[in-house]
Amino acid sequence: MSNMLKYAALAVFMGSIATPALADKAETKGGLKIKTDDGRFEMGIGGRIHYDLYFFSEDDQAAFGSAGLPNRGGADFRRTYLTLTGKAYGWKYKFETDFAADSGAGKTGYREMWVSTNVGPGELILGQFKPFRGMEELTSSNEITLIERPTTTASGIYAGRQFQMGAGYKGLIADQFGYGVHVVSLAAAGTGPSEGMGYGGRAYWFPVATDTQTLHLGLAYSSDREDSASAGVAATFNYGGRRGVSQTLAGAGSAITTGSGAGFGEQDTLALELAGAFGPFTAQAEYAKASFSDAFASGTPASPQDADVTAYYVQGSWMVTGESKPYKKDRGAFGNPKPNGDYGAWEVVARYEIIENDDTSATTTGGCSRPATIPATTPATTRAISSCDISQITLGVNWYVNPSVRFMLNYYMAEADLGGAGANAAGKDEPDAITLRTQLSF
């Protein structure tokens, strides 16, 4: 009898040890999530694979740009992310690395790495994140409507400065207003601690935000001040898709010298947003105006000159199968639709975009530059460009097979005009391109 009591006591003791472990919760809906029973710790695992095929058709009649880029087609893993998110004692965290990182393309190996906590009515973010600069910029790459972002983003007027280290604060007011402010280093992780600073903020209003209808208005301002040659304050644009031509329209001020040494650049940008969704129809537009100090050199002797660059786009989409795109209030941007039927959701989309520098410049680095070989006999001091602009029309079809798998097909028609007249005329470059993306995300 005494042995029976010992065994029973041992069973009760073992059960008391095992019970807390069994109380921890694991969820698999929409991804893998693990949460402790006391709620102090939480972790989610996600990821994305973006595999792109490129078909690039250069303009062999152009005197610059794509004419020198034959056979630019190919394939590439554009993104291969592993994402960890969660909470620890009330602090949120996110760690996101890109296994497709390429130092030659300016990537750092990881994208977002931050911790955050609630402070007052909003959320304080510390680490590397996206500065609050615009609607399309803050849309996830899993949810952008077209494969490439427009000229109002880091693909254009902010020249690659999509993820930066610093501090941010964001929140919602009365479930109708959103805001975010940031102070960041101009360098991404791994490029050094002293490359200048930037600050800015974004505010947006959504008086209508239902499952099928949305009205969004936004305003953003940012100011960047570089203090080293590696900061790279500039406005550039890859026209003709990712395998197209990269053209600088302003910036790269660190290449300009004055009597006192290097004249590092500054950029001040004001941007406006307007978007709406009406059932299966979604439309959005953004306008950005940036002023670059010491953007290029001109005159004899050469002296630093300022430049104003304008960028905007208009974009519309139609869900052929009738779905509506959700509006994410905490981000102030649209997300992916949830397919209604067994055969997924289909979407057609079109976008017109342009980026333009109206200021006169020369062939020195920055400021709407063009090759010095056009024409080679013209003196550099007189080889001026009256203005330049790059416009692009993109047509696309998206197939949302399910919430995790999407196929995207984009066709680009670009036109770059470096301006000038007579012997100074650079002419135009008009390449075409096609990109097909296979996307898996969870």
Image (spheres, helix red, strand yellow):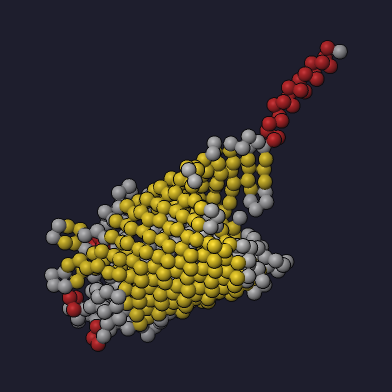
Residue visible at 44% across and 77% down in the picture: 392
In this rendering, position of residue 220 left or right of residue 362: right
Residue 113 picture location, percent across and down: 47, 47
Indicate the position of residue 317 as horizontal and vertical percent values.
Answer: 57, 73
Quarter of the image holding residue 203?
A: bottom left
Q: Decide which of 91, 105 is in the foreground and name it.
A: 91
275 horizontally vs 324: left or right: left
Q: Residue at x 48, y 68 (%)?
A: 274
The answer to whether residue 397 of the structure is visible from this angle is: no
Task: Say whether residue 66 is left or right of residue 402.
Answer: left
Quarter in which the N terminus is drawn: top right
| Residue lying furthest top | 2
- Vertical arrangement, residue 395 with respect to residue 340, above or below: below
Q: Residue furthest right?
A: 1
The picture places residue 249, in percent across and down from the top left corner, at 32, 70
| Residue sitting at x 63%, y 48% | 32
Above or below 411: residue 172: above
Q: Is residue 433 above or below residue 438?
A: below
Asked if one can make out residue 193 in the rendered structure from this viewpoint, the answer is yes
Looking at the figure, which quarter contains the C terminus?
bottom right
Quadrant in which residue 305 is drawn: bottom left
State the residue lying farthest toward the bottom: 422
Rendered image quadrant of residue 409: bottom right
x, y percentage for residue 6? 79, 16
